[in-house]
């Protein structure tokens, strides 16, 4: 699928004076392989969402290079699908129109995207909700639409910004299992931003722990839990030991 | 489903709302019949009689211009409002979208609009007559101007307030700049656009009355001022009521279109 190479990446936001400049990210080096599931973990303000926005192409970096499949990221595009925390569905379009928005604006023929959109809606379990408006759906269902939308787009990289952060515990768990299932089937490269250690451990192959002010990658923690993973692994001794290690890392 | 109970409740509310106006009419009728007052302000019944003749009497009998001319005068005014308002919407909505969306357009047009807006439309009257003469265009120009400010300012605001993540999501899905404008900015600004249209239409009715008093020789505004000059206060009051009814009906029309267009918005606010 698709790999990411990031080196020497800086992001600064100008303040009123040079002394007030905010160094959001400093010296970020990342190598994420094709089909890998990576979590960016850290406290709020550590720049993990900023890093995701740079990869998405929403904002330009101040310095450094950012390559996806060897090509520099200059603007957002369907190759890198973003799942937003609040889903960011177009509220005036129903579920179906939201899911096929991408292929439609790109001018693809319906014969190409209709079957794929149908399949993706089936995978996320929303085949019966095509004509519902986003406002008629629960938070979890909206997030499913957000996932079906980027899958229909055919994105090879999925960038997820605390997508389950606003959901209740039960729904979050269901969504995590759904995401793992989707990932196993389609094997996109996933960069998943979260501040939840359990979530990062349960989902990812590798966790990048970030620290704040300036935002840096503090350490890289591999997660050698066998796949496919079921929710039971989150209570195993190995899981808890890793969780303890990461807690120490975050608190120094 | 509408049950008998809810119909009853609605009727109850309606009759409660009618209580004060009906009482005021009765007081007006009784007090207005007093010898001193009736020569200045006509009673409600006298207004109704005058209105009835204005509506239904055969026109052209003698020199009375208030016989059977109601429909044509309402048509004159409504047609002018329709023209001026349509023009205001056709210019105001696209321009507002562009100003709200593009820094360049904002820098180009915003100072001009904000600079001209404090000049009341009534102050434009002499200018408008000088430019267009005592003809329809003078009236339509004022209506256009009055409606335009409200529409362009609200549309601009709506286009500026589009949620950033909606724009980002659309860009991520491959939308071009033109597609962003058409498929994201426009629908997202729709609620503000309708607010602007409703305010603009109210101002358009003000503008048509003022301009007809001065700049043309027909319509509800012309009749209003003319009837005052010849001392037909019954027609003055009937004319005021007519303006109110037309303003109300045209506002309902926009609200109806809005409720059809913005179903997603209605659901959101429940």
Image (cartoon, rainbow, N blue to C red):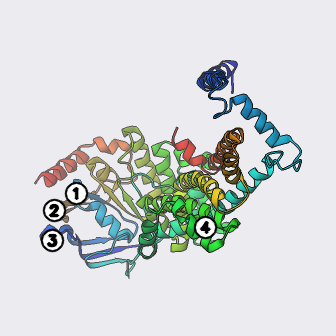
> How far from the left and from the top, in percent, is residue A154?
52, 67
Residue lying furthest bottom in this view? A71
A84 w.r.t. B175: above or below:
above
Q: Which residue is mark 2?
A: A213
Of badges 3 and 1, nearer the viewer stands 3
**B117 sits left or right of A238 in the view:** right
Disc 1 from disc 2: Cα separation: 8 Å
Residue displayed at 60% across by 72% down = B130
Secondary element at tag 3: loop
**A100 sits left or right of A168 in the view:** right
Q: Which residue is mark 4?
A: A104
- Mark 4, residues whose alpha carbon is within 10 Å: few (<14), some, or many (≥20)? some
Residue displayed at 43% across by 47% down = A175
A174 or B112: nearer the viewer: B112
- Mark 2, residues whose alpha carbon is within 10 Å: few (<14), some, or many (≥20)? few
> How far from the left and from the top, in percent, is residue A46?
21, 59
Chain of the residue where label 2 is placed in the rendered structure: A
Residues under numbered marks 4 and 2 in contact, where contact means CB atoms less than 8 Å apart: no
Q: Which residue is mark 3?
A: A17
**A248 sits left or right of A78 in the view:** left
């Amino acid at each position: 699928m698709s790999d990411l190479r990031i080196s020497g990446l800086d992001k600064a936001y100008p303040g009123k004076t040079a002394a007030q400049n905010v160094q959001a990210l400093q010296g970020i080096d990342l190598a994420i392989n094709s089909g890998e599931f990576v979590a960016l973990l850290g406290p709020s303000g550590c720049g993990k969402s900023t890093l995701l926005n740079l990869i998405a192409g929403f904002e330009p970096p101040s310095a450094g290079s950012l390559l996806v499949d060897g090509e520099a990221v200059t603007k957002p595009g369907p190759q890198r699908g973003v799942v937003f925390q609040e889903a960011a569905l177009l509220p005036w379009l129903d579920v179906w129109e939201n899911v096929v928005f991408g292929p439609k604006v790109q001018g693809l023929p319906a014969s190409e995207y209709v079957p794929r959109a149908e399949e993706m809606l089936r995978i996320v379990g929303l085949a019966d909700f095509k004509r519902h408006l986003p406002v008629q759906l629960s938070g979890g269902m909206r997030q499913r639409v957000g996932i079906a939308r980027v899958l229909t787009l055919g994105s090879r990289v999925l960038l997820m910004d605390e997508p389950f952060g606003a959901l209740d515990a039960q729904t979050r768990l269901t969504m995590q299992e759904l995401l793992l299932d989707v990932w196993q089937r389609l094997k996109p490269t996933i960069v998943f931003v979260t501040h939840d250690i359990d979530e990062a451990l349960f989902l990812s192959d590798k966790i990048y722990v970030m620290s704040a002010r300036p935002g840096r990658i503090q350490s890289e923690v591999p997660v050698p839990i066998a796949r496919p993973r079921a929710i039971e692994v989150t209570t195993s001794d190995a899981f808890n030991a890793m969780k303890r290690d990461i807690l120490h890392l975050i608190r120094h | 489903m509408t049950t008998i109970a809810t119909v009853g409740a609605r009727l109850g509310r309606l009759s409660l709302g009618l209580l004060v106006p009906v009482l005021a009419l009765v007081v007006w009728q009784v007090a207005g019949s007093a010898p001193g007052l009736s020569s200045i302000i006509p009673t409600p019944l006298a207004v109704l009689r005058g209105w009835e003749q204005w509506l239904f009497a055969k026109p052209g009998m003698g020199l009375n211009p208030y016989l059977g001319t109601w429909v044509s005068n309402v048509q004159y005014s409504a047609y002018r409002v329709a023209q001026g308002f349509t023009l205001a919407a056709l210019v105001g909505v696209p321009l507002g979208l562009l100003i709200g969306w593009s820094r360049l357009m904002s820098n180009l047009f915003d100072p001009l609009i904000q600079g001209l807006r404090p000049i009341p439309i009534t102050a434009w009257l002499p200018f408008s007559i000088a430019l267009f003469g005592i003809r329809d265009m003078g009236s339509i120009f004022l209506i256009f101007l009055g409606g335009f400010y409200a529409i362009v300012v609200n549309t601009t605001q709506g286009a500026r307030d589009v949620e950033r993540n909606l724009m980002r999501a659309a860009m991520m899905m491959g939308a071009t700049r033109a597609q962003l404008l058409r498929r994201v900015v426009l629908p997202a600004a729709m609620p503000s656009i309708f607010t602007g249209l409703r305010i603009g239409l109210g101002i358009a009715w003000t503008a048509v009355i003022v301009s007809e008093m001065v700049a043309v020789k027909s319509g509800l505004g012309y009749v209003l001022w003319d009837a005052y000059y010849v001392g037909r206060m019954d027609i003055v009051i009937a004319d005021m009521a007519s303006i109110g009814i037309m303003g109300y009906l045209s506002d309902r029309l926009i609200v109806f279109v809005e409720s059809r267009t913005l179903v997603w918005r209605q659901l959101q606010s429940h």
